[in-house]
Amino acid sequence: MAVISPDAPLISAGDRAPRARSLTLGLCLTLLITSVFGLAVGASDTSLWHALLDLAAGRELSLRDEIVLWHIRLPRLLTGLLVGAALATSGALLQGLFRNPLADPGIIGVSAGASLGAASAIVFGASLPMALQLGFWLVPMAAFTGAWGATLLLYRIATRDGRTSVATMLLAGIALSALAMAFTGLLTFLADDAQLRDISFWNLGSLSGANWAKLSLAAPLILLCLGLARILANGLNGLALGEAAARHMGVPVQTVKRLTILCVAAATGLSVAISGGISFVGIVVPHLLRLIAGPDHRYLLINSALLGAIVLVIADVISRVIIAPSELPIGILTAILGGPFFLWILLRQRGIVDL
Amino acid sequence: MSLTADQINVFAGKTQLLQELSFKAIPGQLTAIVGPSGAGKSTLLKALCGDIAYHGSVHLNGRDISTEDAATLAEQRAVLAQATPLAFPFTVWEIVRLGLRGDASPTLINQALHSVDMDGFSGHFYQSLSGGEQQRVQLARVLCQSWSATRDLGPRWLLLDEPVSSLDIGQQLRVMHIARQFTETGGGVVAVMHDLNLTAMFADSVALIANGRLVAQGTPQDTLTSEALSAIYGCNLQVGAAPTNGPFVMPQMASL
């Protein structure tokens, strides 16, 4: 059946895997540089270099340096990395699931669902029966439940017989977002002053609330989701050819779909719980990476996590210094940069996708 | 070791698409499913793939497909759909690689592309190809899946839904030739066909289907007769003998 001899040289034009792997390496290096940058820059004039020299020389850090670097900048940096990775990976996963590059947790209502869950937990949390008092876990759990419910509902509405209608997905996402935001708005009337401050935090999105306690809660689960996403890569590659074709190739389609939804809900829910609604990272990052190294999810997911982390840390640095000493909420910044980008994708797609 | 459907019924809402249909394909043969549009050919193929709900049973290599998981089925049979729309900008090489199972050698990708006459296309974007070229790339992916299966679960199968419908005559012959070669290496092929003369030329067995029922199954000589074809297609078709000894179907103008 094969006329080419087995020892013929391998012609692999069109194989973008080597490029994707070099990209992974490049992104890892960039991530390191960005992280140092994120630690070094801030409103305070604390010098990372001097602090490192002090540590290397065995001297104690000054109390001020210790507070700025260890209690403010480091948890904030790590939170930025995790949230950026989680949001970009969620975007790539959702786009793979919906077979559409326009799916993003912020745009189609997943983040709004998470915000509603978080707000409900803040307002009603205290009045829950003792058995349901999850303490520190309550808000993240509620954010996850909100995100999960929204994703599941959206998938049920937009997908018939394995085909997802783009128009239905975007419109249903708008409706779900509006609904979730309306209920979140209603909750603000029931909230007291302290609760109100907590809720408004979610609507803008910021990393300023980052601390070690929140981080230690969210980090293991987000890392678990990133690992799980890697396992889903082959399944999502199969799904790119449609559900039937994926099944014919041996993909356990239902399992892949369920795990993807769970993974997106957990990653988005936890991100929203610790940093609020930060939109457009999930759409811009995977889209750029697909242009550079192709849509193979084996590389797209890991590269999305890396680039998402880089983008969010850079955005956070900008948001901290651009109007220093006060601070721009990072959600505003990502929306200002991401909105036009989303429109650009829409225009590019206009000829290809039947909206 | 065969691919069989026993007394299957398929419903879409209240409409019955297949009625008490039994079908058998054996390895080493190309079995064509033939019949008018809307007769249930593609529905039968979907049932054989396990894509739709049916009453009755379908057995692949002696095992009931409803109890097998997707991965086990994929080791035994690969499926070519009528058209495969794509969500993201994959290259031809990347599409064919999707068929590769486990850690099989990527040289299979080039062999598959070569056998469908798509050498030199591996760097092209799938979306930039014509419908016929896309179909051949998908066939290469399907061949790749079959060649790289590792577990020995009996003969390998190819299920093809109108594999030549968007191809020119040269490519039609080439694709049918690939299907034949697959049967000569011990595999089984089941293909939904529209072209009766290509069917007569290449099929070992023909299943004639009309109104969701099996009208006849047997060799092309036995099944592709003037009476049977004229009856199920509702027009006057004369079957003669082609130079290669197979039946040759000639539509008659005056009959309509």
Image (tube, helix red, strand yellow):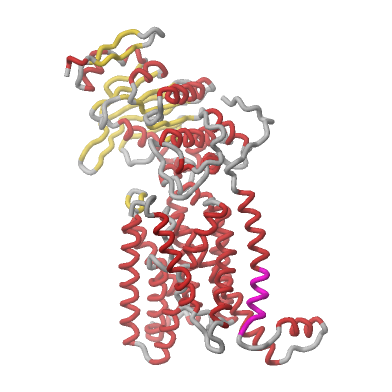
Of residues B64 and A121, the one nearer the viewer is A121
Q: Is residue A56 left or right of residue B155?
A: right
> Is the stretch drawn in magenta largely helix, strand or loop?
helix
Q: Mark yes or no: residue A138 visible.
A: no
From this view, report whether residue A72 is shown above or below residue B166. Answer: below
Count how many numbered circles sit on residues in the image: 0
From this view, report whether residue A96 is shown above or below residue B128. Answer: below
Quarter of the picture holding the N terminus of chain A: top right
The quarter of the picture where residue A217 lies is: bottom right
The quarter of the picture where residue A9 lies is: top right
Of residues A235 and A313, the one nearer the viewer is A313
Residue A307 pos. (x, y %): 58, 64
Which residue is at 47% across, 76% downward?
A331
Residue A117 pos. (x, y %): 39, 75
From this view, report whether residue A236 is shown above or below residue A136. Answer: above
Q: Mark yes or no: residue B80 visible.
A: yes
Which residue is at 65% across, 36% downward?
A10
Q: Is residue A108 left or right of residue A19?
A: left
Residue A177 pos. (x, y %): 35, 70
The quarter of the picture where residue A185 lies is: bottom left
Residue A340 pos. (x, y %): 43, 67
User: What's drawn in magenta, residue-wise?
Assistant: A32-42
Of residues A340 and A278, the one nearer the viewer is A340
Which residue is at 41% across, 9% downward?
B244
User: Is residue B238 covered in magenta?
Assistant: no
Quarter of the picture holding the C terminus of chain A: bottom left
Which residue is at 45% across, 25% downward?
B171
